[in-house]
Amino acid sequence: FGAQGRIHAAVNCASLSCPDLGSEAYEASRLAEQLDDAARSWLGNPTKNPGLGTDRGLHVSMIFKWYGLDFVAAAGSVQAWVRQYTEWEVSDNAALSFITYDWSLNVVNGSGTWTNTAASTQGNSFKDFIRRASPVLIAALAASRPKR
């Protein structure tokens, strides 16, 4: 299927440093397109992947360090994988540096930043997130079961 690397842009733990949570369900007929879009969106968010620095080094999420082999399997190197989804002129030998990971809950706001407004209206704990997400996940799993 070739989801290596891209899967990390789409399926994540919902922390603030993770890629932003998607606003739509993944569909088999559109999965490749949705994974590509998620990768571009994640790399395009400078709070999660700052990109090329003045030193020409590549400053990216810790996810690239933790799951580096997935990106290498998909494109040959982290640098090559990043080039597939950005317009950054990343050289093959660009030094990689990994930004500090923020494990705070990612409130769905698309900005990559924490907002007190969102937290106060949606709840900011992992428990609140699971309480809101569980009915949706259960319904999606039930709908995906083969009919007997």
Image (spheres, helix red, strand yellow):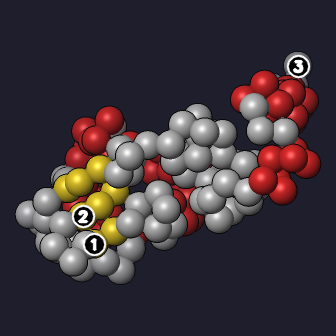
Could one spot residue 4 in this view of the protein? no
- Name the mark on residue 52: 1
Q: Upstream in the sequence, badge 2 or badge 3?
A: 2
Alpha carbons under labels 1 and 3: distance apart: 52 Å
The circle drawn on residue 148 is 3
Q: Is the residue 74 above or below the residue 104 in the image?
A: below
Q: Amino acid at mark 2?
A: Leu
| In this rendering, position of residue 108 left or right of residue 11 | right
Q: Nearer the viewer, residue 20 or 118?
A: 118
Q: CA distance from mark 1 to mark 2?
A: 5 Å
Please tell me how many numbered marks the rendered image carries.
3
Q: Nearer the viewer, residue 37 or 124?
A: 124
Residue found at x 33% / y 37%: 67
Residue kind at label 3, given as amino acid type? Arg
Circle 2 is placed at which residue position? 58
Above or below, comparing residue 98 to residue 51 in the picture: above
